[in-house]
Every structure is written in structure tokens, then in C-alpha cells.
Image (spheres, rainbow, N blue to C red):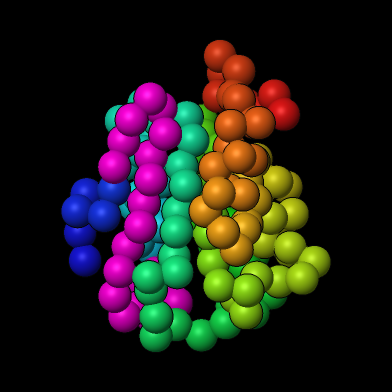
Amino acid sequence: MHVPEYMTFADGLCRFRPRGIVSLVDGVALITSAIALCCAKGGTKILVDVTGLSGYTVPTLADRFWMAQDWAHAAQGRLILAVVALPEYIDPKKFGVRAAADAGLKGDVFTDTAAAEAWLKANEPDAAGRSTG
């Protein structure tokens, strides 16, 4: 699976909507690559919609911790992340969101794209790429 074929970029916002069957490890790596590509393109925000992916297991707390670490490292403190996922994949206490914040990545997870887009619009990065919302 190639990241660019599932990504669009406009006005500092990357939209990444991959489709297909992936393992959890491959899905996390795919999103990590999309975050890095968005940063390389000068993006300040990324919306990742994983509702078109299947085949992966529900992440454990340890999985959520490691994906948050990977994504925060790829973002380098330069962008804000919104993830759209099916409800069964979202931890009710949003452990991954908290782990990402602890690692320096401003992000949140949503069940619908409109809510994710509204949240991204409300969270503008400052000149250094940090969230001001």
C-alpha cells in the first residue's frame, strides 16, 4: 500500500484515507508514514480516516501506547492529528490520545469525519506548530 495514493493535501491539511486489509502493525506503520509525509509537505494538520481499513485487531493499551509514540515521533511536534475510527476501536477513556499528548502530539479520535474536521479547525497551530486550541 502506497501512502500518496490515499492522501490529499490542501491549505496545510493532509487527508489520509487508506483502504484495504492490514495487520495492526502494518496499519500503524502506514499512518506513521502518512504523518511523516504530511510533515514533509509542510502540513500542520492531518485527518486520518481508518474506517476503510480492516483485518486488524482492536489495539491493546500497550499497542495504543506504542502507536502514540510512533506517531508523535513522526509528527516532530509540527502537526495536529485527528483520527476517524469505528467505535469498537476507540478506547472509552482515550488512552491513546493521552499517551500521544504525553509524547508531544496534539490529537484526538472521532467516529465521524465532520466532528474531526470541526475539531481540527478549532485547533490552529501557532508558528512553531503547537496547538493553540
Q: Residue at the spot x=61%, y=18% of the render?
A: 126
Q: Going by the image, does 57 lie left or right of 99?
A: left
Q: Nearer the viewer, residue 5 or 60?
A: 5
Residue at position x 44%, y 65% in the image: 50
Asked whether 13 falls inside the magenta stretch, the response is: yes
Q: Is residue 105 left or right of residue 54?
A: right
Q: Which residues are magenta?
A: 8-27
Q: Is residue 72 visible?
A: no
Q: Name the spot of residue 4 as percent of width and height, x first.
A: 22, 49
Instruction: Place residue 74 in its image quadrant.
Output: top left
Exactly how many numbered labels are in the figure?
0
Query: Is residue 48 placed above or below 37 in the rendered structure?
Result: below
Please provide percent x and percent y for residue 90: 65, 70
Q: State whether residue 119 is above or below residue 94.
A: above
Q: Residue at x 32, y 62 (%)?
A: 18
Q: Residue furthest front?
A: 114
- Residue nearest the observer in this picture, 34 or 9: 9
- Residue 133, image x, y percentages: 72, 29
Q: Locate the N terminus by quadrant.
A: bottom left
The image quadrant that residue 117 belongs to is top right
Instruction: Determine if the magenta segment contains residue 96.
Output: no
Q: Taking 46 as reference, is 99 above or below it?
A: below
In this view of the protein, which residue sits in the foreground, 36 or 21? 21
Q: Quadrant of residue 30?
A: bottom left
- Rendered view: 126 above or below 83: above
Horizontal side of residue 80 vs 14, given as left or right: right
State the image coordinates of residue 104 (x, y, percent, origin top left): 65, 40
- Please give the name of the residue rendered at 56% of the width and 72% of the height, measured from the top-left corner: 86
Residue 57 appears in the rendering: yes
Q: Residue furthest top?
A: 127
